[in-house]
Amino acid sequence: MQRIFENTLKVWKSSGMNKPLIIIGARQIGKTYTIEKFCKENFENYLYFNLEKDVEIAKIFENTLKPEEIIKNIEVRLEKTIDIDNTIMFFDEVQVSERFITSLKYFCESTNNYKIICAGSLLGVKLNRFNSSFPVGKVEMEHMFPMSFKEFLIALNQTMLIDEIYYHYQNMIPMAEDLHEKALMLYKHYLIVGGMPEAVKSYIECGQDIVKFNRDIVKTIVEMYISDMNKYTINKNESVKIEKVYMSIPRELAKENKKFQYKLIEENASKRKFETALDWLNSGAMILSCYNTEKVEIPLKAYLNNDTFKIYYSDVGILNSICDIGVNDIINDSNFMFKGAIAENYIAEELTTMEIPLIYWKSKGDAEIDFLLTTKDGIIPIEVKASDRVQSKSLKIYMEKYKPTYGIRISMKNFGFENNIKSIPLYAAFCLNDLRN
């Protein structure tokens, strides 16, 4: 399956690959597949090492940090000479070797043109707790995410539909009703399948029949995440806290006021007790944090309140799996309150894929804007609605108070522009990338 992230890898290649590249992202989002595909398609020779499985390779870094000695030791084990100039080396599961990460500094400084990419499960957590000398300035770091809705459409060979969506977004005119309904149905299917490549592949293999789609795939991924909490934590007590926070997210999203509250994790829960667990989940890219801003001024990041935030899952398919929401409830557009939380989680994921910071605004009263975007047109408010019923007091209050160039309402309604509010269908959220400052 084609991933937009491949463009990031190509940019690194065209830059000369002078620094090793570290790919950070959650488990099961397709890091290994995407990197391997890139390596095979763009280099004459390609070597793959899994440091979790290739124990003898991992041991090399415990004995030396000198690149030439490391390469010689690898050659002895492979029983062949490595053509450095025409070979790319991909080291996977590097979180098991802190010495390997330290060695990247020396690979960068070497006069030889080593081409190295590395990735790993919960690598973000490892780097956040790095005890040795981290190679600051000697590596490039990029973040990878689950498949976005646009990538989902690409996997379904719906590139013409993508072009049609872009056209109507740019001209802000309604799509033909049949195409609008088709795109909405694919959006609903995406909410169920999510962006994990294995799940998307299964959906395609069952003929895109959402009823036949094996939802156990996503459940298994959630189980793997829980298992990682035990595998990559300091002790059992820490893993229990992390799991409690992770599984409490639906309760947080079910509230009308979605501000994260520690008391929903367990009785007598506190920031002091669970803050480290939250940091672990954030570092592992398993959750997305959206921070409140106290002032609508550029730069928004300068006015964030780090103690007031909302939490979403990194993948909307995981949210629906954990909540065990029925396929028919999504497809038939059943009227249940949690729909709003699902749509909001989806938009949070889409914005994150575009590397747009998640920031929201709340008045001293009850008015709240789901997301604020810093764009070429200034700070733009985004309100998310799960249906085509779009009446809202909050956006009106915000528009009157701050007078933005325009507002954006994302819902099931077709494209349109009236009362200075752009109506953008949920399936067209990927078009917001055009607004990036």
Image (cartoon, rainbow, N blue to C red):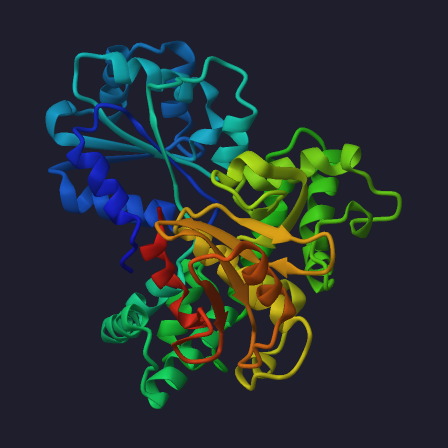
- Residue 291 position, x and y percent, is 60, 45
Quick check: 311 left or right of 408? right
User: Which residue reaches farthest bottom?
Assistant: 178
- Residue 371 position, x and y percent, is 54, 55
- Residue 387 position, x and y percent, is 55, 78
Q: Quadrant of the N terminus?
A: bottom left
Instruction: Name the residue: 23% across, 35% down.
Output: 12
User: Which residue reaches farthest right?
Assistant: 268
| Near-viewer residue (109 or 46) | 109
- Is residue 320 something that shows in the picture? no
Q: Quadrant of residue 250?
A: bottom right
Q: How many marks?
A: 0
Is the residue 286 above or below the residue 173 in the image?
above
- Is residue 99 something that shows in the picture? yes
Q: Quadrant of residue 143?
A: top left
Instruction: Name the residue: 60% across, 41% down.
Output: 281
Quick check: 138 left or right of 288? left
| Near-viewer residue (238 or 404) | 404
Instruction: Name the residue: 54% across, 54% down.
Output: 402
Instruction: Name the residue: 39% across, 45% down.
Output: 144
Is the residue 93 above or below the residue 135 in the image?
below
- Residue 204 position, x and y percent, is 36, 73
| Near-viewer residue (52 or 56) | 52
Is the residue 58 above or below the residue 342 in the image?
above
